[in-house]
Image (tube, rainbow, N blue to C red):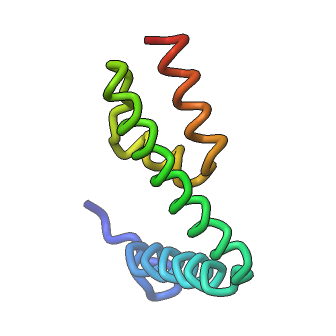
Amino acid sequence: MPNLQMFGFEFNVIIAYIFGIILIYLIGRVFLMPIKLVFKLIYNALIGGLMLWVVNFIGSHFAFTIGINPVTALIAGFLGLPGVVLLILFKIFIG
């Protein structure tokens, strides 16, 4: 493989620095998010998880359960109660 150099630096080092700068920027954005948004995401995750558990607990008596996997957990976690309603409707109409 040819030795790719630009201004005395290897190409891989330049790519690593660019990736590092982008990563630092993204981490900084996460830490600078408004705390209100973080609390809203935590609240939605708790409500969504609780409602998913309630639906499975009550639904088990009627042979209706929603499998808890990473996809359903993310939908219920990000969307909260509307996400659980979406999962219920998806289960009813699709399968």
* The C terminus: image quadrant: top left
The number of discs equals 0
**Residue for point 66% across, 41% down:** 82
Left-right relation of 26 to 63: right
**Residue for point 61% across, 78% down:** 30
* The N terminus: image quadrant: bottom left
Q: Nearer the viewer, residue 43 or 63?
A: 63
Left-right relation of 34 to 24: right
Left-right relation of 78 to 33: left
* Residue 41 position (above or below residue 92): below
Q: Position of residue 42 (x, y in %)?
A: 56, 69
* Residue 27 position (above or below residue 61): below
**Residue for point 53% across, 51% down:** 48
Q: Nearer the viewer, residue 4 or 49?
A: 49
Q: Position of residue 85 (x, y in %)?
A: 61, 34
The quarter holding residue 47 reads: bottom right
Q: Position of residue 27 (x, y in %)?
A: 55, 81
